[in-house]
Image: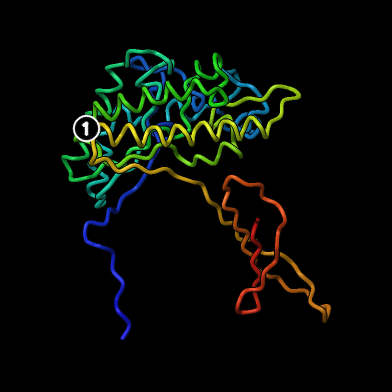
Amino acid sequence: MTEKLTFPEGFLWGGATAANQCEGAYNQDGRGLANVDVVPIGPDREAIITGQKKMFSSEEGYFYPAKETIDMYHHYKEDIALFAEIGFKTYRFSIAWTRIFPQGDEAESNEAGLAFYEDLFKECHKYGIEPLVTITHFDCPMHLITEYGGWRDRRILAFYANLCRTLFTRYKGLVKYWLTFNEINMILHAPFLGAGICFEEGENQEQVKYQAAHHELVASAMATKIAHEIDPENKVGCMLAEGNIILTLPIRETTGQLWRKTVRVTSSLMFKHAGNIQTMPRSSGSVRELRLK
């Protein structure tokens, strides 16, 4: 008889958001401007998030969803109560860097921002919900972009380390599960969104993206070291993006009959180029799988 598969005791069921997806209140209580605040919905979005078009402030005629979102900043108690009603055992969400350090490179933190997240963590614990905190979910202070060029500049590591040390110290005992970066490999696919990078004409874009990726990977390792120094009970990880795309394509068999065949395009979006598509037959012989190498 086949053994029944079960989840281990204490498995954390829950859901996830990001600060730029739900908080709103982008200019309240000392919060500074971030790259996510100036990414609009519309035809220019792709050019902006990929660093091909500069947009460092709000412009007329655009809609910026991160500015208001669902206004969780003012309604988090109601939202967390609903999470508890659903049955969440964990809630993954992120810190808005510019709530803690409005410009990113200050020595002193913004107490209003620290207090907001402390209250949010305590509200989670009130309902038995374990916070899982992403330190950076595409948030990069605009000041670090305009003054340093975002994550292309190695000096950003010191500012990020200061952010991490501040968070780990302030929330010791309240948070033990941390992610250093959300989808760290998205630097290669959306460099302004992932690392605050805009390209100059004639610049070697691949070199800039991989240099920024290196800086974030080093920063992730630094954050892990700091976390364990401050609290050995901290559990720290990172996150990668992966995508599966299901396509239905028309094909013509040797008989000349037209069929529609389903293929799966799997892109790991890792730190490599997506090229050399290979076609591999699956065991059934009726479906083919395309893997991006």
> For the view shown, which residue lies furthest in the bottom direction?
1
Q: Is residue 47 above or below residue 124?
A: above
Total residue callouts: 1
Residue 220 visible in image: yes
Q: Can you tell which quarter of the image residue 79 is in?
A: top left
Q: Is residue 16 above or below residue 55?
A: below
Question: Residue 3 appears at what percent x and percent y?
Answer: 30, 79
Residue drawn at x 72%, y 56% as measured from the top left: 276
Q: Is residue 64 above or below residue 124?
A: above
Q: Nearer the viewer, residue 35 or 40?
A: 35
Identity of the amino acid at label 1? Lys
Question: Residue 27 appears at what percent x and percent y?
Answer: 40, 17
Question: Residue 105 appears at what percent x and percent y?
Answer: 43, 15
User: On the picture, is 111 further left or further right than 41?
Assistant: left
Q: Residues within 10 Å of mark 1 (few under 14, many from 20)?
A: some
Residue 70 visible in image: no
Question: Residue 254 appears at what percent x and percent y?
Answer: 82, 79
The residue identified by callout 1 is 172
Q: Nearer the viewer, residue 207 or 188?
A: 207
Residue drawn at x 64%, y 66% as measured from the top left: 289
